[in-house]
Each structure stands twice: as C-alpha cells, then as structure tokens.
Image (cartoon, rainbow, N blue to C red):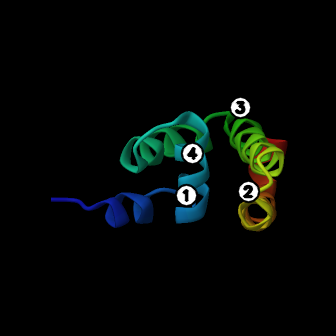
Amino acid sequence: MLTLKDCIGLCDLSEEEILAIADHEHLPEIVATELGNYLIHSPEGVPTIKAMIVDDIRAAEARGDVKRSLELKMVLRHFVQTHRELEAA
C-alpha cells in the first residue's frame, strides 16, 4: 500500500507545494497530491499552481498570519525556481 509520503515522492512537487494546493482547494492532502501531479504535467499547470500559492499568500496576509505568509512566500520561491522551465513550455 502506498502512503501519502510515497505519493508525494512520486509527484514532481514538494510536500509544501502539495499542502498549499490542499489549503487553496480545501482538499485532503492525498487528493491535492493527485491534482498537483496532474497539473504539473499539463500545459496550464505551472501558472495554475503558482496562482494558487499567490492566492494562499494573499489570504494569509488578509487574516494577519505573517508566519504563514512568509512560509508560503518561500514555497512560491522554491516552486518558481524548480519549475521555471515548465512555465515557458
């Protein structure tokens, strides 16, 4: 049986990126892993995931959650650096 960690390991996203998708879409982590894996391999996926993370940052800032906002900014930075080549495709 595959665990959540196994599924995340098979996905081209970090655990933090998956958690941001789960938070944004109000999904269980395992479902967010499946969605993230689908998106990262689709033409519109990188901009879509990037927009989700940016929305999460704005939501954290709106509720005054500075710590979460900073965490998500680091997630966004890692995501952009890691998937830069896919965004141009």
Q: Quadrant of the N terminus?
A: bottom left
Q: Are marks 1 and 2 in contact (CB under 8 Å)?
A: yes
Identify the residue position indicated by label 3 in the image: 44
Callout 1 touching callout 4 (CB < 8 Å):
no
- Give amino acid for label 4: Asp
- Quadrant of residue 45 within the rendered picture: top right
Which amino acid type is shown beneath numbered disc 2? His
Q: Residue tagged by mark 2? A: 83
- Nearer to the camera, 7 or 61: 61
**Disc nearer the start of the sequence (1/3):** 1
Q: Position of residue 4 (x, y in %)?
A: 33, 59
Q: Quadrant of residue 21?
A: top right
Q: Earlier in the sequence, mark 4 or mark 2?
A: 4
Nearer the observer, disc 1 or disc 4?
4
Find numbered disc 1 in the image and state the secondary structure of the residue it sits on: loop
Q: Which disc number belongs to residue 23?
A: 4
Q: Nearer the viewer, residue 74 or 80?
A: 74
Q: Check disc 1 and report the residue beneath it.
A: 12
Q: Residues within 10 Å of mark 3 (few under 14, many from 20)?
A: few
Ranked by sequence position, the earlier of labels 1 and 2 is: 1
The image shows residue 25 at horizontal and vertical percentages of 56, 35
Point out the frontmost of discs 4 and 3: 4
Q: Which residue is depicted at the point 76% across and 47% down?
A: 63
Secondary structure at badge 4 equals: helix
User: In the rendered image, which quarter is residue 82 located in?
Assistant: bottom right
In the rendered image, is residue 52 in sight? yes
Residue contact between numbered discs 3 and 2, judged by CB atoms under 8 Å: no
Gap between marks 1 and 3, in whole Å? 15 Å
